[in-house]
Image (tube, helix red, strand yellow):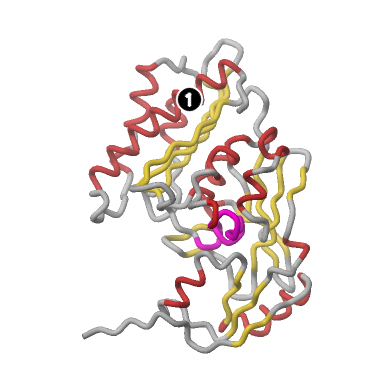
Amino acid sequence: MEVISMKPPKFSYLRPNDLAEALDLLAEYGEDAKIMSGGQSLIPLLNMRLSTPRYIIDIGRVKELHGIKEEEDAIVIGGMTRHVDVEKSELIKEKCPLLTEGIRWVGHTQIRSRGTIGGSIAHADPSAELPCILTALRGEIVVASKEDEFTLTPEEFFLSYLLTSLEPDQLIKGIRFPKLNKNSGYAFEEVARRHGDFALVEVAAVINLDKDGKVAEAQIALGGANAVPFVPLETEEFLIGKEPNETILKEAATLQLEDLDPEGDIHGSKEYRRYLTGVLLQRALHTAVKRAREGVVV
């Protein structure tokens, strides 16, 4: 009989007071340490002993990792910022409404009150909402170590299921979400087995139209369809220069379904998830185009 422990193994708890101290600890213990921000992903892994670090570095007190600020072309969110603070931010609602719309799908209120933006990105679950939204917006992850600070694109950061390019001595300092212009249309669509569950599949889309009503720019990301958020480049290129009527949107939504490789399980087969992605993509494109035509921000 297999016995599964539901208590974490012994570890040393470290709680730095500022970013410099946190990076010093990572430089010293990073190979044997895990960062705890909101704990919504890490604590279950510890309890099931799927993760057995010798050190837990709690970055909750690191003020440099908290907050939301506006730059010229982006909203920068600190890695320790809670989901609920993003959800309630009037600045984000005005400048990046796709993020406001999508983050409401993250878990339940209790999870959004504890979970952090950096934690969700670092966990790198391909069915999570934030990696998909960040990829659609062509955002960036700001990474810091004791020696350096730099940015990575989602394609550079997400390597596979629950795997990123973060090194043991690095942490997510912040995430840059590009602003949407006032005429951008956007949409987020998701299907989950029940409210609060991870998505079976999800779609984030941004559409910009030219003065003639044709697609000038299309940015799309699909979540839950591959081991990392998937950008359907052929679909985006297909839409450019076309009048986005229902026939075009339907064709676009099915153009790259065979390129998807979702994991099938008891909640949905691989074939069902592919089909569902096409349905959600057509729905998201329809909503994004409608909003682009109307200039609606909600």
Q: Which residue is drawn at 65% across and 32% down?
A: 180
Question: At which x and y percent is residue 175?
Answer: 65, 52
User: Is residue 116 a member of the stretch shown in magenta?
Assistant: yes
User: Is residue 95 a member of the stretch shown in magenta?
Assistant: no
Q: Is the magenta stretch mostly helix, strand or loop?
A: helix
Give the camera-side residue of 54 and 197.
Answer: 197
From the viewer's perspective, is residue 206 above or below residue 58? Answer: above
Give the camera-side residue of 251 and 106.
Answer: 106
Q: Crowding near pointer 1: few (<14 within 10 Å), some, many (20+)?
A: many
User: What quarter of the picture does the C terminus occupy?
Assistant: top right
Q: Which residue is drawn at 30% across and 54% down?
A: 263
Which region shows up in magenta? 111-123
Question: At which x and y percent is residue 17?
Answer: 77, 74
As drawn, which residue projects farthest toward the top? 212
Q: Mark 1 points at which residue?
A: 287
User: What quarter of the picture does the N terminus occupy?
Assistant: bottom left
| Quadrant position of residue 3 | bottom left
| Quadrant position of residue 60 | bottom right
Q: Which amino acid does label 1 sit on?
A: Thr
Does residue 275 appear left or right of residue 127 in this picture?
left
Does residue 297 appear left or right of residue 260 in this picture?
right
Question: At which x and y percent is residue 75?
Answer: 71, 44
Does residue 155 appear left or right of residue 195 in this picture?
right
